[in-house]
């Protein structure tokens, strides 16, 4: 969570900016952007090590007799990783920052190798992680996962297909714990099943083709693993430690017994207690699959994780990973403190929470802080997108214009993206529409970056005149057609992700030239979200991070998610509830896009990419959301690495589904 | 006298009860609830939840119940010492506040001692030596102290502390001591980290108190009884300390009512800027996240301390100032 004294933060930025002189004028010439690189997974049987070695801290426990020897802890089929540069050395503590109990994603992502699959260094192809191999049946109805023989949870209990079935039957289908089925486990409203084929084989089965679930098993989705989806009161994830969790469920003892235990621990009932027990960020006793497990929980000033003695990855010489003993994240509730600590060399690796605006200062202090800075470019289209509420009705006149495509296009043509890019992205972003980066197979073509996304004041004015907004007041602002008052568009600007309020003030100035009055309302985050969900906003600025995999995170492009689709929440509710609630869109283009999205699960990858391209063409042409600047180092893009830390890729995939820094394999980082 | 105290005590209880009602209403006033705040927060960290997941959360925390039901649940638990469960920290409220209470007290009390230790002598000096070079100097410094916003001072000192003395930035412990059990080294580490916040917190308060002390004392020094005492040949320091200073202390005693809650909350902005693990930022965060029970308990605690502080300051005033004591009889 980002709480900060706004004044203080701004002032510090000023204070820091004063010392900043060095600014990279050309991104590629700066030497900060490298080619993607990363550790490689070894599948050649000849290179799979037969003998294993372990960290000194574990060897000590083996000698003391409190831990079985490493050969019994590593699975018979471990994941073998070829480190990026060299075989590492054991030891050390990775120091980083987190900003409070709400920042669980910080650790989830470090431990995200507990997903079934991961992604390669550019985020294009799925690679093995927990699952050794997988296959999708030709008809798309069954996705089979092959697990690793002899793999164990962090407490030493076996990890098998039973842990999937336990999660499915005892947690997910228990309506006291999970109220409703998740979208990922349904096709056409019909629920899917999780089936054990043998000890190490498990299948996800559906009544209709589902080619999408294989991607959802390795991404930021409902089936995205234990650390991501079984923390923070959530109970999705796909599997769970059955041997440990059984004792907390009424099915395996009795309702009274589990409730008694819960009350003894200070909880109202067993459900509340279970939400604590199965949360890896809170409960150090919980068995996990990630490289590190919590020893000091997230609700303390220092979130500390220690190596998982049963971790299932080894390097090419048979050293059990991870190399680093501990991860220690220190609490700083103020973002500026995190950035100031960063330049003082207090972190060994940090990308989360580092702000692009502080890049010059970070660069200047490289030698003193003994770290290097690398720039990663995101592949999603917009750090700042103005989501126009096409389903707005509270004020019919405003609603009429927001649902008028020429009005939306004119607004987009009135924005000077270059000025914003220079001011807020240090010129490192890409001005343009909301469309995903050209490198993605879902991108429909280079011309869509500029479509309706260049500055053309004359054309914008002419378009607005021709749709009937030709009358203006003495200050030059266009008038409403119903009562002759000034046409005022409200923007709910939240202080998060980007300095949205300041960015919007600049856009408001720019739109004066086309006679549009933009009223920037700086709004508290929760209030803004409540208004968006209730269909009460005109315009909501947010990024579309995640849309680089359109069918994994469609919410910021299409009106399909009632919580996050700010460009048409009432239509999204209609779509998500299958017409039970919300409102049916009149606009055939919205209906067409929703239909394309709905069909995606039944399409194999190639056809699915074609559908994505079609959706992007419609979305860019219809301007439901105005893209401003994106494909930038705006989030996770500024990466600080201590000079003592080896094997950290200079550039890796920072897309949402890659779960940064998981795609950089922190397991094989080590201290020289 | 006893009847007076009892009456005050009874009134205090009624006040505390109304504070609890008001607290609860105020916390419920902003639109949305913890679940909404949770959605917003997840989105900011690049993650999402489904509506059904949110509905499960709401049910788990009983957020859907009517307000009076929630209030009585809260009140009946509180009476037996259970202050509820912090939804954001996912721990009992008592533990969350307890962690930070002692550090907050340490900083606040240190700041208070510095404030009073500086303000009283300087205030007396400035009044007695009015318009001397020293008075002008302290007045100048005092006005600067009053005029400079605390958070700015905190930022500048933090920056200077880091660039010139290599002090670690923010927090109350160096990372290596954060988890360590208490030891002499950890205590020393805490002390070095406390210098900055103490200076910042004490500056504004000191400047303010110097001005009050000086003004009050000046009024008293012109009173005929002071002239008489001097004429009778009392030593100068005794003339000043015996009566005028005691009378001038009245405002100090009456400010106790506000100092109590302040000691517990610390300064929110300064704590945020300096990343101090005190109760202030906890309250702010609880309010933003709509973490009902945590915010409620802190606000209630502050209210109760104000009531107690006022009560104590009344007693103090009676003790210092005979005029008040005699009015009651």
Image: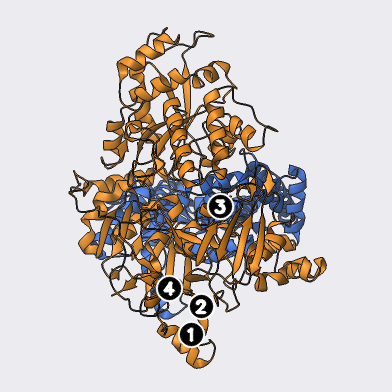
Chain colours: A orange, B blue
Asked if badge 4 and badge 3 are on a common chain, one would say yes
Q: Chain of mark 1?
A: A
Check disc 2 and report the residue beneath it: A75
Q: Chain of mark 4?
A: A
Give me the residue at 42% from left, 20% from top.
A517
Q: Earlier in the sequence, mark 3 or mark 2?
A: 2
Find the distance from the CA under tag 4 to the CA under tag 2: 22 Å
Q: Chain of mark 3?
A: A
Q: Nearer the viewer, residue A556 or A496?
A: A556
Give me the residue at 49% from left, 8% from top.
A484
Give me the residue at 60% from left, 63% from top.
A279
**Which quadrant would residue B122 be assigned to in this image?**
bottom left
Whole-percent x, y for residue A69 in the image: 50, 87
Foreground tag (3 vs 1): 3
* SS for dot 4: strand
Check disc 1 and report the residue beneath it: A71
Asked if badge 4 and badge 2 are on a common chain, one would say yes
Foreground tag (4 vs 3): 3
Check disc 3 and report the residue beneath it: A138
Q: Is residue A178 visible?
A: yes
Q: Earlier in the sequence, mark 4 or mark 1?
A: 1
Q: Earlier in the sequence, mark 4 or mark 3?
A: 3
Disc marking residue A133? none
Q: Earlier in the sequence, mark 4 or mark 2?
A: 2
Q: Is residue B58 left or right of residue A223?
A: right
Asked if badge 4 and badge 1 are on a common chain, one would say yes
Disc marking residue A326? 4
């Amino acid at each position: 969570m980002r709480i900060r004294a706004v004044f203080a933060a701004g002032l510090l930025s000023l204070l820091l900016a004063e010392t900043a002189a060095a600014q990279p004028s050309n991104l590629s010439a700066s030497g900060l952007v490298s080619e993607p690189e990363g550790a490689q997974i070894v599948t050649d049987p000849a290179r799979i090590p037969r003998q294993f070695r372990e960290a000194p801290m574990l060897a000590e426990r083996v000698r003391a007799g409190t831990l079985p020897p490493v050969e019994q802890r590593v699975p018979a089929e471990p994941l073998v990783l070829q480190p990026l540069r060299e075989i590492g050395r054991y030891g050390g503590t990775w120091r980083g920052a987190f900003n409070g109990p709400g920042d669980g994603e910080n650790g989830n992502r470090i431990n995200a190798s507990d997903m079934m699959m991961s992604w390669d260094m550019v985020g294009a192809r799925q690679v093995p992680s927990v699952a050794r191999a997988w296959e999708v049946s030709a008809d798309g109805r069954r996705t089979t996962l092959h697990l690793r023989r002899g793999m164990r949870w962090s407490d030493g209990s076996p990890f098998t297909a039973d842990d999937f079935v336990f999660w499915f039957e005892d947690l997910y289908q228990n309506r006291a714990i999970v109220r409703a089925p998740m979208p990922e486990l349904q096709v056409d409203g019909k629920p899917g099943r999780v089936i054990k084929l043998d000890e190490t084989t498990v299948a996800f089965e559906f009544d209709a083709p589902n080619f999408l679930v294989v991607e959802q098993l390795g991404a930021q989705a409902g089936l995205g693993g234990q650390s991501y989806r079984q923390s923070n009161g959530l109970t999705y994830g796909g599997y769970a430690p059955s041997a440990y969790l059984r004792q907390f469920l009424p099915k395996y003892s009795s309702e009274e017994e589990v409730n008694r235990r819960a009350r003894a621990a200070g909880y109202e009932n067993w459900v509340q207690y279970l939400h604590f027990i199965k949360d890896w960020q809170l409960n150090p006793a919980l068995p996990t699959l990630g490289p590190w497990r919590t020893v000091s929980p997230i609700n303390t000033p220092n979130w500390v994780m220690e190596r998982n003695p049963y971790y299932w990855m080894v390097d090419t010489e048979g050293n059990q990973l991870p190399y680093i003993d501990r991860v220690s994240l220190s609490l700083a509730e103020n973002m500026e403190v995190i950035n100031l600590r960063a330049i003082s060399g207090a972190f060994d690796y940090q990308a989360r929470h580092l702000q692009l605006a502080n890049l010059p200062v970070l660069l200047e202090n490289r030698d003193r802080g003994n770290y290097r800075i690398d720039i990663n470019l995101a592949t999603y289209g917009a750090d700042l997108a103005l989501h126009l509420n096409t389903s707005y009705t509270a004020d019919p006149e405003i609603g009429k214009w927001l649902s008028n495509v020429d009005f939306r296009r004119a607004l987009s043509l009135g924005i000077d993206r270059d000025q914003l890019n220079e001011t807020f992205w240090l010129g490192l972003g890409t001005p343009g529409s909301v469309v995903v980066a050209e490198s993605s197979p879902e991108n429909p073509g280079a011309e869509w970056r500029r479509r309706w996304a260049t500055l053309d004041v004359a054309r914008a004015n002419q378009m607005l005149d021709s749709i009937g907004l030709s009358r203006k007041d003495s200050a030059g602002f266009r008038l409403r057609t119903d009562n002759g008052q000034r046409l005022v568009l409200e923007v709910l600007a939240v202080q998060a992700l980007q300095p949205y309020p300041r960015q919007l003030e600049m856009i408001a100035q720019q739109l004066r030239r086309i006679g549009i009055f933009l009223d920037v309302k700086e709004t508290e985050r929760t209030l803004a979200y409540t208004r968006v969900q209730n269909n009460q906003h005109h315009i909501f600025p947010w990024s579309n991070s995640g849309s680089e995999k359109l069918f994994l995170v469609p919410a910021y492009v299409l009106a399909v998610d009632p919580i996050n689709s700010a460009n048409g929440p009432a239509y999204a509710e209609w779509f998500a509830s299958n017409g039970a609630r919300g409102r049916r869109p009149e606009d055939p283009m919205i209906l067409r896009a929703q239909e394309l999205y709905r069909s995606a699960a039944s399409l194999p990858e190639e056809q699915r990419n074609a559908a994505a391209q079609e959706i992007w063409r419609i979305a860019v042409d219809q301007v439901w959301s105005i893209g401003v600047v994106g494909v930038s180092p705006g989030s996770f893009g500024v990466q600080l690495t201590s000079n003592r830390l080896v094997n950290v890729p200079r550039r890796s995939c920072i897309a949402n589904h890659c779960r940064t820094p998981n795609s950089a394999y922190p397991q094989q980082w080590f201290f020289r | 006298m006893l009847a007076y105290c009892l009456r005050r005590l009874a009134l205090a209880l009624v006040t505390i009860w109304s504070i609890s009602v008001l607290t609860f209403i105020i916390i419920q006033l902003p639109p949305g609830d913890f679940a909404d705040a949770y959605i917003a927060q997840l989105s900011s960290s690049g993650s999402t939840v489904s509506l059904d997941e949110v509905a499960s959360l709401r049910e788990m925390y009983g957020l859907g119940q009517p307000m009076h039901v929630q209030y009585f649940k809260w009140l009946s638990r509180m009476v037996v010492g259970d202050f509820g469960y912090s939804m954001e920290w996912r721990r009992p409220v008592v533990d969350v506040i307890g962690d930070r209470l002692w550090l907050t007290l340490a900083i606040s009390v240190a700041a208070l001692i510095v404030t009073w230790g500086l303000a009283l002598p300087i205030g007396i000096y400035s009044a007695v030596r009015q318009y001397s070079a020293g008075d002008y100097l302290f007045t100048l410094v005092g006005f600067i102290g009053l005029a400079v916003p605390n958070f700015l001072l905190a930022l500048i000192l933090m920056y200077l502390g880091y660039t010139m003395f290599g002090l670690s930035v923010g927090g109350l412990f160096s990372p290596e001591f954060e988890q360590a059990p208490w030891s002499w080294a950890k205590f020393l580490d805490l002390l070095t980290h406390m210098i900055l916040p103490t200076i910042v917190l004490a500056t504004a308060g000191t400047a303010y108190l110097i001005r009050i002390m000086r003004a009050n004392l000046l009024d008293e020094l012109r009173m005929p009884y002071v002239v008489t005492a001097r004429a009778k040949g009392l030593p100068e320091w005794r003339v000043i300390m015996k009566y005028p200073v005691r009378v001038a202390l009245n405002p100090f005693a009456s400010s106790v009512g506000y100092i109590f809650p302040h000691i517990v909350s610390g300064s929110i902005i300064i704590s945020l800027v300096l990343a101090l693990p005190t109760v202030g930022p906890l309250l702010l965060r609880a309010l933003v996240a709509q973490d009902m029970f945590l915010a409620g308990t802190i606000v209630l605690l502050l209210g109760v301390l104000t009531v107690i502080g006022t009560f104590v300051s009344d007693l103090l005033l009676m003790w210092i100032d005979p005029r008040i004591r005699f009015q009651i009889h």
